[in-house]
Amino acid sequence: MAPSVLPHHVGLRPTGADRGPLALRAQAEGKIGVLVPAENAAEAAVVAGLQVIPVQNLREAASFLEGTVRIAPVKVDLDRVFEPLAEDELDFAEVKGQESVKRALEIATTLAMEPELMLLDEPTQGMGHEDVDRVTQLIKKVSAGRTILMVEHNLNVVANLSDTITVLTRGQVLAEGNYAQLSKDERVKEAYLGAGHE
């Protein structure tokens, strides 16, 4: 039940992770705005036509809803955020089944937060060759001026994107270097190709 301090038109209900991102759900339901944790506000603000109010804690959220605190909505320059995607002619109208479009959106919303470091966990997993190539090129574009730490098992992607590669086996560092060095390293070949690799 919503506390009595909230206006009658404000409903509180739990948000399940299975229902999708809050900002997208709010947009689909015709809401005009959402309150989100401040650290997630830039990412949520990528959703067009939605006011995103960043709050530090529940007390600040309640004060905003009571009208005792004013908080400006987060503004994101969508042209700047989506600029790396502009020349790829991706169809954002229906992302279902389009793995490269899903990854492009994930990367674009991350860029809205202007990170110096991006962590990518197998960004090309489950994709066909064309999608892998598109996402690889996008990652290459957005890597300018930032560090990208990526877990990836597709060796073509690793070869095309990596400056420095750290090879792990059983949770331990086996080798580190560039792709040319590591592709000749017998320990790496043994660990990933097995005994009869020649």
Image (tube, grey):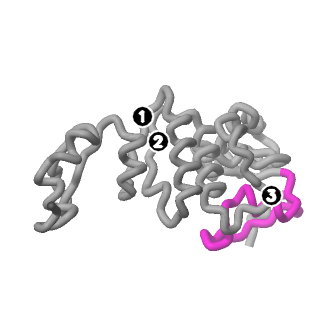
Identify the amino acid type marked 2. Answer: Met
Name the mark nearer the viewer: 1 or 3: 3
Q: Residues within 10 Å of mark 2 (few under 14, many from 20)?
A: some
Identify the amino acid type marked 3. Answer: Ala
Asked if residue 102 lies in the magenta stretch, the reply is no
Q: In which quarter of the image is the N terminus?
A: bottom right
Label 2 residue SS: strand
Dots 2, 1 in contact, CB < 8 A: yes
Residue 180: assigned label = none
Give the main secondary structure, helix, strand or loop, of the magenta stretch: loop
Residue placed most toward the observer, 10 or 50: 50
Residue 75 shows in this picture: no
Image height of 79 relative to 11, above or below? above
| CA distance separating discs 2 and 1 | 6 Å
Between discs 2 and 3, the one toward the N terminus: 3
Residue 118: assigned label = 2
| Residue 38, image x, y percentages | 61, 43
| Residue 78, image x, y percentages | 75, 37
Q: Quadrant of the C terminus?
A: bottom left
Label 3 residue SS: loop
Where residue 108 sits, quadrant-wise, is: top right
Residue that carries the numbered disc 1 in the rendered image: 147
